[in-house]
Amino acid sequence: MKLPYILYLMLLLAALQACKSGKTPNRAASDAAERLQQIKLTGTTTAKMFYEQLPSASGAEYTSSGLYVLGDDSPYLFQLNESFQVVKKYVLSVDSSGINGGRLPKASKPDLESMAYFKYGRDEMLLLAGSGASTARNRAYLINLSENMAVTPLDLSRLYTFLKRVLKLETNGQLNLEGMAMDGVYTYLLQRPLGINGNTLIRFDTNAFKRFLMYDGDLPAAALYHFDLPKLGQKQAGFSGAYTVGDKLFFTASVEDSPSAVEDGEVLGSYIGMIDLNALPYATNPAKPLAVPTLALNNPNGTGYVGKAESLVVFEGQEPGKYKVIVLSDDDQGHSELLQVQLVIE
């Protein structure tokens, strides 16, 4: 009689445990949001550099050959060394007419706002992508690092038209893609909000995304995730850059008093933030965007940083939860800045 009794108890305990752990999707989303809100980001800005001849930094990526930086109105891709000094610049396939002070005119610039590294076969590639805020800004460039920096221009109009439809921007709003990151499984684009639209992460399967890029293949399926970022006064912080490390997507965000994706405005402040990619299933409701931890950027002397952070590169530290973050910013005056930040996730 003992064996059936023990089995009965085991089954009863298992049933009770299943009932205890069973949660509705809304409850699970609430728990995930609560856990994220308990995460705290702390950090110290240890250094700041100013670039007179590197205009409008808007994207950054790190490869085995160094740190690459692009400017949203620059005809060049810049390569930096380990001391973050500019050592080379490469000409992109852009119309150089109208260049003034190393900058392309606002009306015709490709507005390259994001950059990502990936491998294609044996080749190492950089993808530089425009924001999609106008027809001129639908352009992109593939740089083959393995083939002497060969440049291939791309037209992303088909993809961007698709994304406008997915984001429901055909009649209200504007496409404004400001960040991009790729890993071996997924590719991420960050849509910066304008007006009533929120901060949105767009996710694609990386292999499908590569086929689209390299062969002008089928449009990759897109999944949307929505996030709640801080406000300064009445102004919402908006995504501006992305970088993945393991199961975390780090981002920059800035608060700018601007009426559109084309016009510049007064910058009120900038942030570093982190999205736990495991929590994406709980960020699918645009009416209830998921709050994520952020850190307001400061100057090395501790005062608030009011530059426009546009991109970042993140290196894991030797201790768990510690990271070295390189932030690039644009002053809208034809110059750029670089911040070195020691970030801690608690």
Image (cartoon, helix red, strand yellow):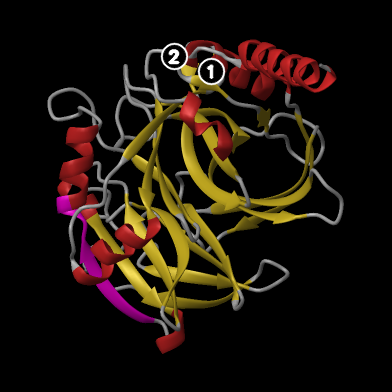
Kind of residue at disc 1:
Ala
Kind of residue at disc 2:
Lys
Q: Is residue 151 magenta?
A: yes
* Magenta range: 150-158
Residue at (46% x, 47% y) in the render: 333
Residue at (80% x, 54% y) in the render: 317
Residue at (45% x, 44% y) in the render: 332
Are the residues at dot 2 and dot 1 in contact (C-beta closer than 8 Å)? yes
Q: Percent x, y for residue 28?
A: 56, 17
Q: Earlier in the sequence, mark 2 or mark 1?
A: 1
- Say left or right for 338 vs 343: left
From the image, tell me which residue sits under label 2.
Answer: 288
Corner quadrant of residue 67: bottom right
From the image, tell me which residue sits under label 1.
Answer: 29
Report, in whole angstroms, how far the alpha carbon at label 2 lies from the one at label 1. Answer: 10 Å
- Tell me the quadrant of the picture where the N terminus can be found: top right
**Helix, strand or loop at disc 2?**
loop
| Residue 15 sits above or below residue 223 on the image | above
Characterize the local packing of mark 1: few (<14), some (14-19) or many (20 or more) Cα atoms within 10 angstroms.
many
Q: Is residue 322 magenta?
A: no
Q: Percent x, y for residue 321?
A: 79, 43
